[in-house]
């Protein structure tokens, strides 16, 4: 390890930045309110944090929120699913959310010739002050490692708190919705449920008629669906229950604007 570099600590002695450890510096690239983000470049490497807009908390408390797939050069939208009232998945239902997009400082389109740039001894850019937007800063408030949060919030230990419902939560890296015919196939998303955060990952088991035409149930979250035989009237796309996925394979993280 090199003995040269820049180390920044907070007033509690915690290391906020250390160029000798090849730390990554992330900054807010976009911030706003809408049904999706406008940025379409490098989005596979970015993080999207969302929360209900002020005054919409109660309205959205019954909705499960997820993002469309992160594919470069395509827009990423926000969608909602209500397992009680919204049986079908197609077409997806857009939802307006407060959001901000976080990207590595090296991936920001930079302007101007003046500022502070920090590299580690390998030559990788760790920080570039030209990427900072004045007044837009965030603080990570909660982190759950991969496979530590179950896809069924009812299975969490009694008294366990996923995190603050008032914070922004990342949805770009782990939420997903995969249809099966014209009913819910697999959903992995977040719910701002009144005073608590809930993480969902489940298969909506289709009717017997739909099962005959469905795939193997493989999902991007790493689980494998094996729905049991449905009991609904054949020929009707009426889900007959849910099968919950294994723990979520990706990290789940929240943040607040500071």
Image (cartoon, rainbow, N blue to C red):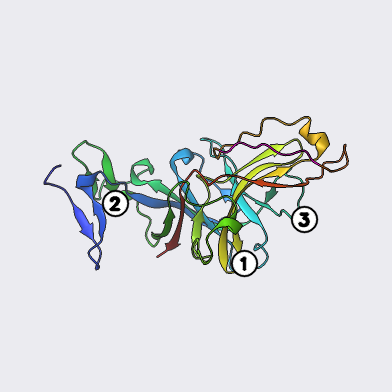
Give the percent coordinates (x, y) of residue 203.
67, 43
Q: Which mark is residue 57?
A: 1
Highlighted range, magenta:
223-230
Give the percent coordinates (x, y) of residue 99.
52, 56
- Does residue 67 belong to the magenta stretch? no
Viewer-nearest residue: 83 or 172: 83
Neighbours of disc 3 within 10 Å: few (<14), some (14-19), many (20+): few
- The residue labelled by disc 2 is 129
- Does residue 226 belong to the magenta stretch? yes
| Whole-number angstrom distance, CA of label 3 to CA of label 1 | 18 Å
Q: In what element is the residue under mark 2?
A: helix
Rendering quarter of residue 191: bottom right
- The residue labelled by disc 3 is 85
| Left or right relative to 220: residue 132 | left
Q: In what element is the residue under mark 1?
A: loop
Q: Verify CB contact (< 8 Å) between mark 2 and mark 3.
A: no
Q: Quadrant of the C terminus?
A: bottom left
Viewer-nearest residue: 99 or 142: 142
Give the percent coordinates (x, y) of residue 53.
58, 64
Give the percent coordinates (x, y) of residue 141.
41, 61
Magenta-highlighted stretch: main secondary structure?
Answer: loop
Q: Verify CB contact (< 8 Å) between mark 3 and mark 1.
A: no
């Amino acid at each position: 390890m090199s003995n040269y570099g820049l180390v920044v600590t907070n007033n509690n002695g915690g290391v906020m930045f250390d160029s000798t450890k090849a730390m990554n510096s992330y900054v807010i690239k976009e911030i706003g309110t809408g049904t999706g983000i406008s940025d379409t470049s490098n989005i596979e490497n970015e993080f999207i944090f969302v929360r209900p807009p002020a005054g919409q908390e109660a309205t959205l408390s019954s909705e499960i929120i997820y993002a469309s797939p992160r594919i470069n050069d395509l827009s990423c939208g926000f969608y909602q699913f209500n397992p009680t009232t919204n049986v079908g998945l197609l077409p997806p239902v857009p939802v307006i959310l407060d959001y901000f997009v976080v990207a590595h400082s090296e991936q920001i389109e930079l302007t101007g010739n003046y500022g502070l740039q920090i590299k580690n001894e390998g030559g990788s850019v760790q920080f570039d002050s030209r990427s900072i937007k004045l007044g837009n800063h965030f603080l990570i408030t909660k982190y759950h490692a991969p496979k530590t949060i179950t896809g069924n919030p009812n299975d969490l230990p009694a008294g366990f708190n996923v995190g603050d419902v008032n914070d922004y939560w990342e949805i770009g890296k782990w939420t997903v919705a995969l249809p099966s015919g014209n009913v819910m196939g697999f959903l992995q998303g977040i719910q701002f449920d009144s005073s608590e955060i809930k993480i969902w990952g489940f298969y909506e088991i289709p009717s017997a008629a739909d099962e005959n035409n469905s795939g193997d149930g493989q999902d991007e979250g790493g689980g494998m669906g094996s729905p049991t035989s449905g009991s609904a009237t054949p020929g009707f796309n009426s889900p007959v229950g849910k099968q919950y996925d294994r723990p979520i394979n990706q990290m789940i993280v929240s943040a607040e604007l500071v």
